[in-house]
Amino acid sequence: QVQLVESGGGLVQPGESLTLSCAASGSILSFNTMGWYRQAPGKQRELVASITAVGRANYADSVKGRFTISRDNAKNTVYLQMNSLKPEDTAVYYCNAVIRPQNWGQGTQVTVSS
């Protein structure tokens, strides 16, 4: 199992930006597609963005045009740039392999509130 450590969350106002990072303890290339998930209170965890090993990205409709996922395979790190944040983006954010999920990390809390 590869260990995943998410960071970069915080409390921001609506319209502001955050960049999340996910550092893996091993190579992420072996997993091909990596994804960012989020789980809001009382809701199921949802996939919001994914990226293949060659950089092809997909987004949930709710974040399309505002979030950008990227990866640095050499650093075994996945990023999520989040712009124009909304209160409904408030959640704990996690990263994981999409096809062969590893143990979930602790996630990073993102709170969007005025």
Image: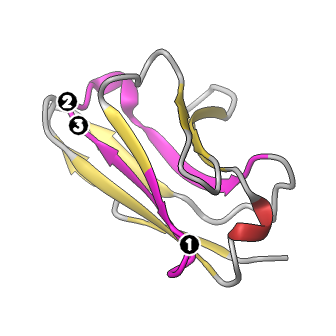
Determine whether the residue tagged by mark 2 lies in a helix, strand or loop. Answer: loop
Residue 10 in percent (x, y) is at 28, 55
Q: Nearer the viewer, residue 55 or 105?
A: 55
Q: Residue furthest top?
A: 61
Q: Are marks 3 and 2 in contact (CB under 8 Å)?
A: yes
Residue 107 drawn above or below residue 3: above
- Give the number of callouts: 3
Q: Which numbered disc flags the more N-terminal residue, 2 or 1?
A: 1
Residue neighbourhood size for the residue with mark 1, other residues' Cα within 10 Å, grouped as few (<14), some (14–19), many (≥20)? some
What kind of residue is marked 1? Answer: Asn
Which numbered disc covers residue 83?
3
Quadrant occupied by the N terminus: bottom right
Q: Nearer the viewer, mark 1 or mark 3?
A: 1
Residue 81 drawn above or below residue 75: above
Which numbered disc covers residue 84?
2
Q: Which of marks 2 and 1 is in front?
A: 1
Task: Specify whether residue 68 is in view.
Answer: yes
Q: Residue furthest front?
A: 54
Seen at 16% across and 29% down, the residue is 14
Q: Are marks 1 and 3 in contact (CB under 8 Å)?
A: no
What kind of residue is marked 3? Answer: Asn
Seen at 49% across and 61% down, the residue is 71
Tell me if residue 82 is in the magenta stretch. Answer: yes
Label 1 vs label 3: CA separation?
A: 23 Å
Residue neighbourhood size for the residue with mark 3, other residues' Cα within 10 Å, grouped as few (<14), some (14–19), many (≥20)? some
Determine whether the residue tagged by mark 3 lies in a helix, strand or loop. Answer: loop
Write down the region rendered in magenta: 70-98
Q: Which numbered disc flags the more N-terminal residue, 1 or 3?
A: 1
Determine whether the residue tagged by mark 1 lies in a helix, strand or loop. Answer: loop
Residue identified by numbered label 1: 73
Residue 18 in percent (x, y) is at 25, 50
